[in-house]
Image (tube, rainbow, N blue to C red):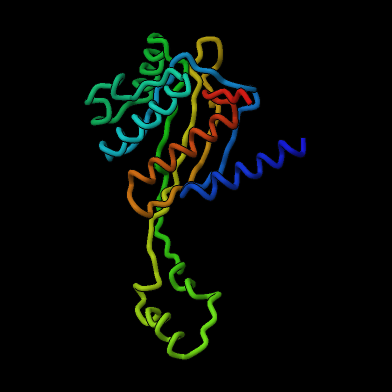
Amino acid sequence: MRKSFHFLIITLFWVASCSDSELIENWKNPDFDLFESQKVLVLAISNDVENRRFFENRVVNQLNNKGVNAIVSDSFFDDSFTKRPQTEEDVKAIENFLLQEGYDAILVTKVIGAEDKVTLVKSYQNFNKTFETFNEDYYSNQGLFDLKEHEESYVVYHAESVLYCICPDKDRQVVWRASINVNKLDSEKKAIKDYSNMLMWTLESQNILILNTD
């Protein structure tokens, strides 16, 4: 038991240290010990078509590689779907049609907020360094006179993924929900990759879609 706990701590540390994503919330419906899907629709809600497709394709490929039958939303919805508001009746009809087409789950992901962050990491690059002379000290830290030299700005996206069950023998309900913060440091594509990696790890750890066989 202690060995397993130690391994879990190491795994959590490794995931946190190798990613710019942070798991904020991870809730699993207690009615589901595990959840397998015969056919899951992956849907990203975003007005950025390029990034939406990039995310959906990446998540679908990752799920397919884990043996999960996942489909991108473009394979189901036509182009007009997102170009006009849908009524509650429309959405209910879509859900029923998904069920008729053999889908039993929908994985929905959306960005629910974003904020600018500033870090002073560059300012502290010489914090633990001892200088023998004023010349060394001044030369190494003169960049602090320039605000741009020691401030780094980046965006933190607050995103949420929710898995809904549309199983014929169960009430329509939430199976699992997670909130993940992801830092956009280098590019939006890298942020999407970090998010999807965290998403896969979390699903597997909860035995949701991807069953953990360890």
Instruction: Give the x, y percent position of residue 133.
Output: 49, 90
Picture residue at 35% right of the left edge, 79% below the top: 146
Picture residue at 34% right of the left edge, 21% below the top: 90
Asked if residue 70 lies left or right of residue 200, the reply is left
Q: Quadrant of the N terminus?
A: top right
Q: Is residue 179 above or below residue 142?
A: above
Asked if residue 6 lies left or right of residue 115, the reply is right
Residue in front for this viewpoint, 5 or 162: 5
Q: Is residue 148 above or below residue 92?
A: below
* Residue furthest front as drawn: 132
Asked if residue 35 lies left or right of residue 2, the reply is left
Residue in front for this viewpoint, 107 or 144: 144
Q: Quadrant of the C terminus?
A: top right
Instruction: Give the x, y percent position of residue 24.
Output: 55, 45
Picture residue at 53% right of the left edge, 37% below the top: 178
Quarter of image, res 34: top right
Instruction: Give the x, y percent position of residue 15.
Output: 54, 44
* Residue furthest right as drawn: 1
Instruction: Give the x, y percent position of residue 191.
Output: 39, 46
Residue in front for this viewpoint, 99 or 38: 38
Asked if residue 80 lies left or right of residue 103, the reply is left
Q: Is residue 200 above or below residue 67?
A: below
Picture residue at 35% right of the left edge, 53% below the top: 186
